[in-house]
Amino acid sequence: MPNVVSRFARSWQLIQASCNVLRADKALLILPALSGLATTALAIGFVTLAMLNGILTSKSGSLNVFGPLHVWLFCWYVVQYFVVIFFNTALVGAAIALLNGDRPTVGAAFKMALSHIAAILGYAVISATIGVLLQALAERLGLLGRLIEVMLGLTWTAATFLVVPILAAEGIGPWQAIKRSTALLRKTWGENLIGNAGISLATSMISGWVGVIGVSGAMVLFELGHPVVAVTLLCASASTLLLIVLVAAALSAIYAAAVYHYAVAGVPPTNFDGDLIRGAFARRGT
């Protein structure tokens, strides 16, 4: 138990170190913002096309049997994963450059991601296939299928945690990147998972408080007859939630870049405390 507690404590310190890196170059927030805009536009476009083609309203719009909706869903997964992975590759690539002491630009990050576009597309197709298969499994087996879907989904997420840094830094194919990510995972003793979970947990807690304060505060203000102040509070809460999402995405990228850097090089990246990262990313047998 103390060992688990110490691992979470070290991972929290690494998250704080990632925050320090982000403060040094806030331009990293631009990439997740662009990713969010792109995925939102694609979601609206796909839903609109599906409705215009009657896929969502017809009998074929059921997931119980294989049909056009499955094909549509697979295409949506591929496009969505491609966009997300593309922007994440650019973001993590910029984070890796930043940790190496460089000053990356958004243009350079996009250029790097474009140079690996074939591998990114291949990984998107693999991820989409896994997603559709897991969903089909969950539908066929009911509750047991849902449990299997969650377990296999977590395993897949763990095994592929370092795929994006590998695609950004090494430019190898998607299958090779998955195998290398799994191998590197064994070297980092799970701190990458704990740290990423820590970022998600912290983000969820802060977002929850912001949402509660914004909604409840606005309701009280409406009741007291201050609609302008209530709307202002709601807008401020929404803006804060958006900023939290962008910061969380940037921190996850920096964290993944730090894990990858030390797993590969064996030395702490720039701007990270040497003793901290050596202790957190202890290799097997040490």
Image (cartoon, grey):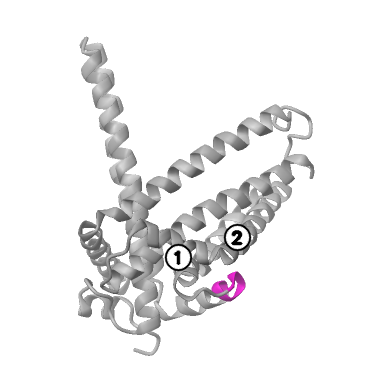
Question: How far is the residue under mark 2 from the one under mark 1?
Answer: 14 Å
Query: Please, what secondary structure does the residue beneath circle 2 have?
Result: helix
Q: Quadrant of residue 192?
A: bottom left
Query: Please, what secondary structure does the residue beneath circle 1 have?
Result: helix
Which residue occupies the foreground of this view, 171 or 203? 171
Labels 2 and 1 touching (C-beta < 8 A): no
Position of 272 with respect to 83 (left or right) is: left
Query: Dot 2 surroundings within 10 Å: few (below 14), some, or many (20 or more)?
Result: some
Q: Quadrant of residue 4?
A: bottom left
- Residue stretch in magenta: 173-178
Position of 34 with respect to 47 (left or right) is: left
Residue at 62 percent across and 52 percent down: it is 78
Q: What residue type is disc 1 on?
A: Met
Q: Is 9 rendered above or below residue 55?
A: below
Residue at 30 percent across and 75 percent down: it is 280
Residue at 61 percent across and 55 percent down: it is 149
Which residue is identified by label 1?
112
Label whose residue precedes the other's in the sequence (2 or 1): 1
Q: How many marks?
A: 2
Q: Quadrant of the C terminus?
A: bottom left
Q: What residue type is disc 2 on?
A: Leu
Q: Position of residue 35 (x, y in %)?
A: 44, 48
Which residue occupies the foreground of this view, 113 or 228? 113
Q: Position of residue 204 (x, y in %)?
A: 35, 46
Query: Dot 1 surroundings within 10 Å: few (below 14), some, or many (20 or more)?
Result: many
Residue with the most extreme top position: 225
Q: Is residue 102 in view?
A: yes
Numbered mark located on residue 121 in the image: 2
Which residue occupies the foreground of this view, 119 or 219? 119
Numbered mark located on residue 185 in the image: none
Q: Nearer the viewer, mark 2 or mark 1?
A: 1
Residue with the most extreme bottom position: 285
